[in-house]
Amino acid sequence: MKSLYFRFLSVFTAITVLSGSLIGFVCYYECEALLNAQLSNFIGESARSINEVIAGRVGSAAGVIRAASKKEFMAAGDTAEIERYLKNAVELSDFFYNIYYFSSDAKLSAAAYSDNLDVKPYIGLDYNGFAGDANMKGFRASALKSIELKSPLFSGTFYSPAKKLLFTYIAPVISGGKAGGLLSAAIYANDKNFQNFITALKSHPDQFICLFDSEDRLIASTGGDMASHCSRYASLETGKILWNPAAEGTEACLLVKVKEPGACISTLTGVGARAVKNTMANLRSKIISYTLLAIAAVIFISILFARALIRPVKALVDGLKRVDEGVYTHRIDSEGAGEIDEAIAAFNKMNEKLHKTRVIETLWNERWND
């Protein structure tokens, strides 16, 4: 009976292991496909959300400058009042590095810095003098365009004389239908507050964020190995989620670049291949663990089932052995239903008949001998 028991158990175990392994493999590859799809959706939604937040934050800050440009004291050119206002505005804002007021003659009349930098050395600065400066001529062009259009706009990025990467929001001060001055609010891309603001937008530890201006020049990034190579991704097609293969000094990554209509900033965000691999490794280990636990549970159940299945067969075999030994009074208890139980019932009936026959034979022999 041991051989029959082990045969049953071996069959059940083999079926369990094979089916469990197959289910585990299918689950893993299905989960991998689902995870890649979910990760792509996460990257796309994350980039759009980040871009909306940044565009909204920049737009809100720009609204402060637009409102300031419409103040009466701005149009009147009240330098003392303008200076007080700019100091309050830059202190209340955690977004602007500095705010400049240029009078109608294009000269700097008032300014305020978030780090309380002394503004006296800059007073009297004429932005028309930037015409021959390769770095600052873009600011001059933006200022002149803003005055010409009588409308606020963002400049491209540029480096200040102190080597700070800036991009500015420029708003003309309109008085009597004419531009009577100019407000310029600069956002310092490497400012601690601005960096903290960008970093706080990360929704995954291995995520990186890069900001580009309208000319695809890098404004800021969250740092890290991937972000240090962000300039490679500046020319990516907007809105397309793609897997970017590894290049020298970088790892592969899943990334997307988005830009809000009319915004001056585009956002690129991505997750390095290491994060994807770690996630897949965790998923694989969990699936393997759960599969092994399921296989162990099914094998345990199979052992119990095999024992329950073999028990009546073993009882029937033992009964036949007793008959072979000449014991006809042996009965096998059976309360179930099925072919094996029918065989047991037939055995009991046969044994009963054999017992009666044996008793009759014994009585006949006794009387015959008498």
Image: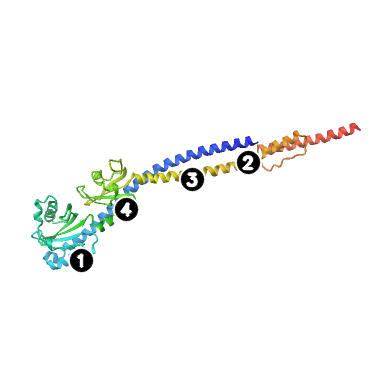
> Label 4 to label 2, Cα distance in Å?
57 Å
- The residue indicated by pointer 2 is 307
Asked if labels 2 and 1 touch by Cβ distance under 8 angstroms, the answer is no
Disc nearer the start of the sequence (1/3): 1
Q: Give residue 142's position: percent from left, percent from top.
A: 14, 53
- The residue indicated by pointer 3 is 290
> Label 1 to label 3, Cα distance in Å?
61 Å
- The residue indicated by pointer 1 is 88
Q: Nearer the viewer, residue 148 or 314?
A: 314
Q: Quadrant of the N terminus?
A: top right
Q: Residues within 10 Å of mark 2 (few under 14, many from 20)?
A: some
Q: Looking at the picture, which amino acid does disc 1 mark?
A: Asn
Disc nearer the start of the sequence (2/3): 3
- Give the structural element (helix, strand or loop) at label 3: helix
Q: Nearer the viewer, residue 221 or 139?
A: 221
- Give the structural element (helix, strand or loop) at label 4: loop
Q: Quadrant of the C terminus?
A: top right
- The residue indicated by pointer 4 is 202
Q: Looking at the picture, which amino acid does disc 2 mark?
A: Arg
Disc nearer the start of the sequence (1/2): 1
Q: Residues within 10 Å of mark 1 (few under 14, many from 20)?
A: few
Name which quarter of the figure residue 100 lies in: bottom left
